[in-house]
Amino acid sequence: MSGDGDWPRWFSTSRFAGDRKWADHARQLLHAQRDALLELARLKPGDSVIDVGCGDGLLGIQALVLLETGCVTFCDDSPEVLEACRRSVSGLGFGDRARFVRASAERLQVIGNGSVDVAVARCILLYVRDKKAVFRNLHRVLRSGGRFVVGEPINSFGFGEHVERGIRGIEVPPLEGLAGKVRSVLHSGQDAWREQMLCFDERDLQDAAREAGFDTLTMSYETYEGFSALPPWEVFLHSAANPYTPSLAEAVRQALTPAEGQVFLAALKSTFSRTVRIRRRFAWCTLVGERP
């Protein structure tokens, strides 16, 4: 994955706060997204596939399962994340059909021109500053007739006009002053959040792919507005939304005095325990392109 966040720690610990049951619950959604993207990839025996910003190998490992023959190149900019992915792939017995390349999504260095049949990526563009460069390099590495499949959340829909109150949807009106301090820490230093994650929508991605030279494009765009269940309190407290963000517990320690933190977390937990679900708003874009 691209960017300056703490990716190794996020993948290993703070993503699900070490809660295996919650991780299994979350992975049901991840696997549904994975399967939908790979179905659109139309993998064929012998295909050369690249998993761009592979992270823990969600897409690439399943591509190896689906391919009777062929190979997958796992590409990531974090050496620690790439090594963890390598161990997972080797443990599953796919080492002979996989290679691992440290490269950013914006450059795809080391990947040869016209050397790839299929490129897949999920949730990488929101962490990349130069999104147009990603599509230019996908066009470069794909063979004629090759295709890419990209799935991305469109955070400008969910957050662009939303003014947050409380903490992650849980409001504590009597302590809004303390909540504001905690929010400041949660969002501090996150230039990437504003500059990378919220600065684009589905039309920008389609335009970037077209400018890169892809003349056959198919896009689907889904939105959801409703409610979702809360995670367990310990997950709510110790998980981080992304590698750029501290956990709530870390933010409280940084923003408040120990006495303030104790009062604030007690009030927040009391409200949390009485809350069954929180309002949620998000959008998801899938873009498929074929190289002429």
Image (cartoon, rainbow, N blue to C red):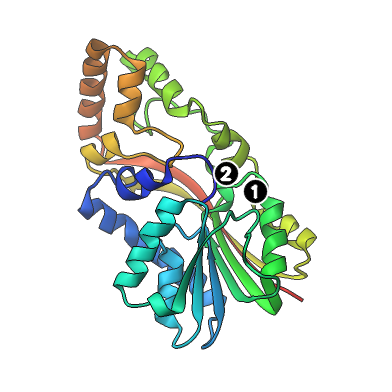
Looking at the image, residue 16 sits to the left or right of residue 274; the answer is right
Q: Which residue is labeled 1 in the image?
A: 201
Q: Position of residue 113 (x, y in %)?
A: 70, 71
* Mark 2 residue element: helix
What label does residue 157 carry, if any?
A: 2
Q: Say what amino acid the circle numbered 2 marks.
A: Phe
Q: Say what amino acid the circle numbered 1 marks.
A: Asp
Residue at point 22% right, 15% down? 263
What label does residue 225 carry, if any?
A: none
Q: Nearer the viewer, residue 246 or 174?
A: 246
Looking at the image, residue 288 sits to the left or right of residue 193; the answer is right
Q: Is residue 135 visible?
A: yes
Q: Is residue 203 visible?
A: no
Q: Quadrant of the C terminus?
A: bottom right
Query: CB atoms at circles 2 and 1 under 8 Å apart?
Result: yes
For the residues labelled 2 and 1, the Cα–Cα distance comes to 8 Å
